Amino acid sequence: MKQLYAISILIFLFTGYAKAQETHGIQQPVTTQDEVNSSLNIDIAKIKLPPLSVLYENARSTPSIEILEKEKQLQKKILAKEKRSWMSLFNAFGNISHGIADNIGSLIYRYTGTEQTSWSVGGSVSVPLETLFDLPGRVKRQRIQVDIAELKKQQAYEELKIQIAHLYVQILSNIETLQRSAEHLALYKGASAIAEQEYRNRRTTIEAVAQTKEKEFGANQGFAALRSTINDQLLMLEIISHTPILTIQEELSATDGMDKSENTELK
């Protein structure tokens, strides 16, 4: 029912358009793939991905990996503290005093004026047996915590690399598909233009033109959907790899546009 409704609208539109153009004999040029790309504001040839090695290396600076790196450093600090924990078994103290001695009797105060200095140094050892025998075990357990932190970081990094590789392959495949889709869209646009001209020349029916237009519409929708998917994948790859991709592409496009405008002004 929807297709019949769409065809009816197309028939009405093309009938009026054909009558308006019939007396003028205007020839519409066939649409090319370059025209399709320029009209949709996309330059497929300039979509270039950095090497995977660059993406992998830049991914090390992502916040998720840096958090795990900080956790590993924290565990190392705790390990260093555990290695020095034996020092808590020993206590050392010292005291020093300096002054002038006086002699005070029951009734008479006598100032002797003797300068005196005294000092004392001491130490103590407290050895809880449980703490003493557990010192090697505490160091070993903390070494295990350091290893666990390192393994968590490596695991997160490997998972991130898998995501990057998966997106990388998908984007390359979709770019190739997008190029073929642009070719098909250009063909359908050209076929639509030819069908319209044939209808104006009374060599085809309006139903045939409507069918061609419907195919062109479907090809256009598929092209736009695939282009949107590639943009989403590029943005995702840029985020998880911590590497500018679309930003560079936009800067290159802006530079090319400025160069073209300058060349046009010079001409």
Image: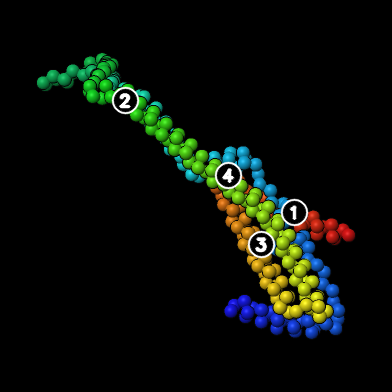
The residue identified by callout 3 is: 223
| First of labels 1, 3 by sequence position | 3
Instruction: Report, in whole angstroms, how far the alpha carbon at label 2 lies from the one at label 3.
Output: 64 Å
Q: Residue at x 78, y 81 (%)?
A: 18
Mark 2 or mark 1, whichever is nearer to me: 2
| First of labels 2, 1 by sequence position | 2
Secondary structure beneath dot 1 equals helix
Secondary structure beneath dot 2 equals helix
Instruction: Report, in whole angstroms, how far the alpha carbon at label 4 lies from the one at label 2.
Output: 42 Å
Please state if 140 lies on the left or on the right of 218 as rendered. Answer: left
Q: Position of residue 213 (x, y in %)?
A: 70, 72
Residue lying farthest to the left in this orientation? 106
Image disc number at residue 236: none
Which residue is at the front of the view, 214 or 29?
Answer: 214
Could you tell me which quadrant the C terminus lies in? bottom right
For badge 4, the amino acid type reads: Ala
Question: Is residue 40 placed above or below 84 in the rendered structure?
Answer: below
- Which colour style is shown? rainbow
Residue 38 appears in the rendering: no
Q: Are marks 3 and 4 in contact (CB under 8 Å)?
A: no
Mark 1 or mark 3, whichever is nearer to me: 3
- State the image quarter where residue 164 is shown: top right
Q: Residue at x 22, y 22 (%)?
A: 129
The residue identified by callout 2 is: 137
For badge 1, the amino acid type reads: Thr
Please state if 161 lies on the left or on the right of 82 as rendered. Answer: right
Q: Position of residue 179 (x, y in %)?
A: 70, 56
For badge 2, the amino acid type reads: Gly
